[in-house]
Amino acid sequence: MAVSDNKLADTADKIFIGKGEQPAWLTLALANRHGLVTGATGTGKTVTLQVMAEGFARAGVPVFAADIKGDLSGIAETGEAKDFITKRANEMGLAFQPDRFSTVFWDVFGEQGHPVRATVTEMGPLLLSRMLDLNDVQEGVLNVAFRVADENGLTLIDMKDLRALLDAIVPAGGKKASDDGEVDELADIRKAAQGFGNVSKATVGTIQRQLLVLENQGGTKFFGEPALALKDFMKTDSDGRGYVNILAADKLMESPRLYATFLLWLLSELFEELPEAGDLPKPKLVFFFDEAHLLFNDAPKALMDKIEQVVRLIRSKGVGVYFVTQNPIDVPDKVLAQLGNRVQHALRAFTPRDQKAVAAAAQTFRPNPKLDTARVIMELGKGEALVSFLEGGGTPTMVERVMIRPPTGRIGPITPEERKAIMKASPVKGKYDTAVDAESAYEMIQKRIAGTAAPADEAGGSGATASSGGGILGQIGSIVGTIFGTNVKRGRMSTGQIVARQVTRTVTNKVIGDLAAGVGKSVAGSLGSSVGRSLVRGALGGLLRR
């Protein structure tokens, strides 16, 4: 018996995902408990992702999603009432109403969307080491380079800044300080680097070659300014709907490690910048991580621990993370345990690994006495799925077999002309489209070689600020002006300054709030909380790897 369409429309607190014996609803208040969408190629994962993204956008929740094949771009254009779409809608008792959603396109390479850039400082040594596939020794040298840059006020913005710094800590020719005057200008930088241990020419040379590989993959376009402001991901349109941010990732996927590290950087930046939000009626942002297995493949234990930590804690910032991959066994158990909302499309058990994946998928669901979950997973048709969403106090529902509702936006990619028209009307048009090459480490080092700049311990400005005070606590006092704002861009600050700015702003906001409330609470707890959040991000972005 058909169900009236008004009973299956999205509500103020739920998103309608599909229907079997019962409708399947995703509760907005529990959507930041994260989720998992799995299934073999061609079983309908992309359509499910689009349905979920549309539901969040209608509810006023901004969405970020990587578009691997280009199919997700259709969400920006009005859907078409094709026969198979209207047939599925009618079978559900759902009135199909074509729709379109406000969309912003992004592209690391700046070809199919607005450029996405980060500074080398923001990326940090740990994620950069992951991106470059460095071993422990090479990662250690990279950490030394970041420390030397911080203490000498050398802002690391783009690839040439990092190259120049590596050349400075170990000259390419292995010259001694007394060989010629040119090298003498950088003697203090080289001495500072060697103070942390032997920095060999061979190790630096290996890092430089890995940087060349990254440059050949398009890394030079990723590092630079203007750096991405994450608030541009978290916009709503004039109708109160959340913007759908789509990252064109077809070309980026040619460099899987770059793709995975870039998305992990985005997550760590969200974790760092967003304030604690607690339990909200709906998320601030939903983040879809497609081809999620690339994030976990060959990841060292230290990085895996931090990924698990960020996924676990970012929920309190109001961000929901949904991993999309083929097999549930692609996701480590510690991360899998954090994913409360599940959509499982068909799997095929052709190999022992496939059979293990089917068994693992079946075991992760709350059993339904009416279903043989393992058998049904292999019988699902295209567009069908087993679903279990959180409800009530956060307990998962019993697994149900459902047909996923049809999207209201277009299914399939948009044309290049349509993409250009959407980008022309984008709310961030012109903000990121032109790269800026301001003075940073490369230019500073060149000036020192030419003898036109004083050494860092004699110079004023950001260099002196970054190296004074004997560490983070000393830097807090020297840049206390950041309490009231600063004209130094986040991407151009040294790593120490970034942490100090976060601490001082958090403490000041707390003090002002306490005074206004007349309670006079100690700010010690706020200081500890802020430093703790910076430490967690620091392990990913490299702020406090000292």
Image (spheres, helix red, strand yellow):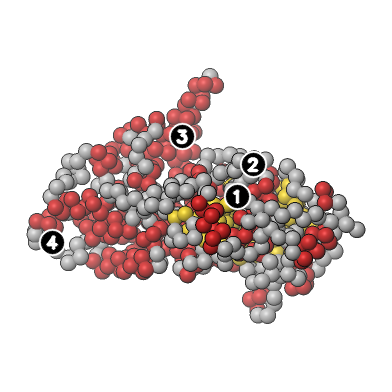
Residue 121, how many percent across, how many down? 36, 51
Looking at the rendered structure, the secondary structure element under dot 3 is helix
Residue 213, how many percent across, how many down? 36, 69
Q: Determine whether label 4 and label 3 are within 8 Å by CB.
A: no
Give the mark toward the camera: 2 or 3: 2
Of marks 2 and 1, which one's residue comes earlier in the chain?
Answer: 1
Which residue matches tag 4? 176
Residue 100, how many percent across, how many down? 65, 53
Which residue matches tag 2? 239
Looking at the rendered structure, the secondary structure element under dot 4 is loop
C-alpha distance separating marks 2 and 1: 10 Å
| Front in this rendered view, residue 541 or 84 | 84
* Amino acid type for the residue under numbered disc 4: Lys
Give the mark toward the camera: 2 or 4: 2
Which residue matches tag 1? 102
The residue at the point 88 percent across, 57 percent down is 2
* Amino acid type for the residue under numbered disc 3: Thr
